[in-house]
Amino acid sequence: MNVKIDKEGTIVILTGAGISRESGLDTFRCKDGIWSKVNLEDVATPEAFIRNPKMVQDFYNARRSQLMEDKPAPNSGHLALAKLEENWPGRVLIVTQNIDNLHEAAGSKNIIHMHGELLKVRCNHCGSLRHWEANLHVETECPDCAETGGLRPHVVWFGEVPLQMEEIYEALEDADLFMSIGTSGHVYPAAGFVQAVTQLGGCHTVELNLDPSEGATLFAETIYGPASEVVPAYVDQLLES
Ligand code: BJW
């Protein structure tokens, strides 16, 4: 860490699939990642859900079952961020692109899931939003309006607007430290956050990732290695500084 952050300051942490990889969850764009096995146009767009809802439901059913059955545990990267929130005198906000529940399992409280949550579904007919652990089928009836065909995973597909964007940009405006962890920087608007805080001024930016991301040169500080190692080390430095 090459600067001192005000102890009362706000820390905004963007996380991506890389932080959950050592917990056994696949990333998207690594060599063996999700997009090497399935076309994103077939499963992660609203058009795909209209064209072939079964294929989309099956894709998310498999990932939901993995969370429910394998019960992946948070790793030391997730745990370090929970420790930071617990011990940092200022505000700590995690903005995660991940739809898994590993930040919650680690004990973090202040979390925005900008790309949604795998254990939630919503109804296109009545708009209800529910915690959901079972498989979802095209004919599954909505428990609130009893319509079929409307229930969908509560996730943000390409072309849809990510969640809680106003809250995220407000936090970025206040940020004294912006940390980006385990994300490749391919997907906007998340990939644009580093530029946004840099333009606002007064915010230190750091990338913690396995490899340099698309936007690596935009960060003031970069640290490369597995999240389970580099995140706890960085958090300890912050708390000791
Ligand atoms: C490790 C590690 C270890 C590995 N330790 N690190 C042209 C230009 C600009 C933008 C656009 C454009 N054309 C279209 C767009 C917009 C589009 C977009 O960005 N497209 C790009 C592909 C170009 N974006 C959208 O459509 C978004 N909506 C939008 O823009 O709305 C408009 C709007 C915005 C704001 C206000 C108002 C209006 C929606 C994006 C939805 C993304 N959805 C997905 C799938 C749904 C969720 C799910 O199924 O899980 O979200 S796509 C997928 O990518 C998923 C992820 O959250 C997201 C990001 O991936 P992530 O997390 O970065 O993973 P990877 O695999 O890419 O990277 C992993 C990294 O970890 C790597 O760097 C590794 O090195 C590292 N790593 N092991 C540490 N052990």
Image: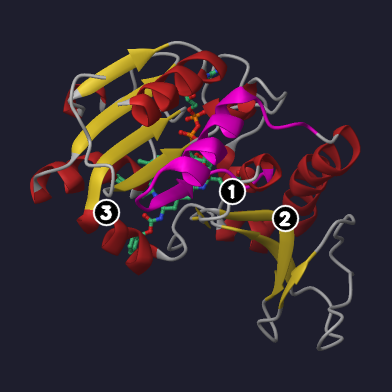
Residue at which label 1 appears: 44
Helix, strand or loop under label 3 = helix
Magenta segment range? Answer: 72-101
Whereabouts is ligand 1, in terms of quadrant? top left
Residue at position x 78%, y 32% from top?
Answer: 72
| Dot 1 beta carbon under 8 Å from ligand 1 | yes
Report how far apart the C-alphas of labels 1 and 3 lie in the structure: 27 Å
Report how far apart the C-alphas of labels 2 and 1 lie in the structure: 11 Å
Helix, strand or loop under label 1 = loop
Residues at marks 3 and 2 touching, judged by CB atoms closer than 8 Å: no
Residue at position x 56%, y 26% from top?
Answer: 77
Residue at which label 2 appears: 52
Q: Which of the marked residues, 3 or 2, is nearer the chain's N terminus?
A: 2
Helix, strand or loop under label 2 = loop
Please name whichever residue, 196 or 32, is drawn nearer the observer in this view of the structure.
Answer: 196
The three-letter amino acid code for the residue at tag 1 is: Ala
The three-letter amino acid code for the residue at tag 2 is: Asn
Residue 44: x %, y % from top left = 59, 48
Residue at position x 19%, y 46% from top?
Answer: 197
Q: Mark 3 or mark 2, which is nearer to you?
A: 3
The three-letter amino acid code for the residue at tag 3 is: Leu
Residue 21: x %, y % from top left = 63, 23
